[in-house]
Image: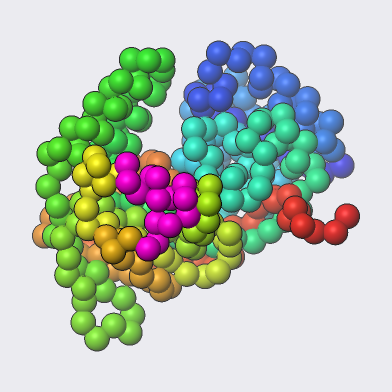
Amino acid sequence: MTRAVLVMNNRAGTLAGRPELPAQIVAALREAGFDLTVIGEEVTPDISDRLEAALATDAPVVIVGGGDGTIRSAAARLARTDRVLGILPLGTLNLLARDLGIPLEPLAAAEALGRATPRAIDAGEVNGEIFLCQSVIGLPNMVGRARQRFRRRGGFYAVIRVVLAAIRALLHQRPMRLMVNAPGWERPWRLWTRAMSIVNNGYEEGTGLMFHRPRLDGGSLYLYVSRKFSVGWTAKMLIAMALGRWKRSSDIRILTGPAFSIHSRRRRLLVMNDGEGAVLSTPLQYAIHPRAITVLAPPPKDSSE
């Protein structure tokens, strides 16, 4: 049996209204073949302290249940160590789990981790902050902050408040004046934009594929810049993404490289790394660390039995 330690974010959305689920997850992981130690809220209610308690054990596998932000926090502690990160998707988007092919249903995910094997993936970094999926600057962050503020309340009220925040941001947020530079460039790129996303390896374009990364160890950052960000344009882009045609838009610029620096007249910018907000000093220094995190990942669907 594989020795593992489990930490779950009990505030994750998937656990809401399902008090029986944590015990079922523990049972499923043990049934999947893990010799499991559980670091629960009785040890400490703070998720960061529980992650530290998990790392203090000698278990070679650290299984973390939560959303992309919780997974990011765990990965930052496990980077460049010999520990393996197991991901239980319990959040709203679960982008990394989707890209790794981990089932989004928690009990199915627990069973899949028992068959998974270690896989090294890249980690992005901005000013010392790790991100495994994407780092976002600009207008989407206002929506992200509203979602963080109201998600604990849940229900229809929270949805309405987030929608209102999104509409207010789309109507009133002014463009940012930024300057982007990268190693080897002869001159920086100056631009006005309302939204910019720096992605740890690039998105794939295809019918039904939205924000999907086919590769997580390509060693490159992808910078996506939107010149427009109105309500109508956003709806148009979502449709284009669903149809697999969004990269054809003249309003999207895509740059790629191992590092970027982003300068602003503002001394600090709000940055959302895998859904978690941080106010960082400018310039923002982005870099990628190839194969810095080892995760448990199911075998590819097309692999031979």
Residue 35 to residue 298: above or below: above
Left or right of residue 154: residue 195: left
Report the residue at 66% width, 48% height from top. Answer: 101
Residue 58 in view = no
| Image location of residue 46, percent across then percent down | 48, 28
Q: 143 or 11: which is nearer to us?
A: 143
Give the position of the N terminus as an image quadrant: top right
Magenta stretch in the rendered image: 235-248
Residue 183 to residue 80: above or below: below
Left or right of residue 115: residue 53: left
Residue 1 to residue 30: above or below: below
| Image location of residue 305, percent across then percent down | 88, 55
* Magenta stretch secondary structure, dominant: helix
Left or right of residue 304: residue 208: left
Q: Would you say residue 246 sits in the magenta stretch?
A: yes
Left or right of residue 252: residue 274: right
Report the residue at 56% width, 25% height from top. Answer: 14
Q: Would you say residue 264 sits in the magenta stretch?
A: no
| Image location of residue 79, percent across then percent down | 55, 57
| Image location of residue 12, percent across then percent down | 51, 27
Report the residue at 84% width, 38% height from top. Answer: 33
Q: 237 or 117: which is nearer to us?
A: 237
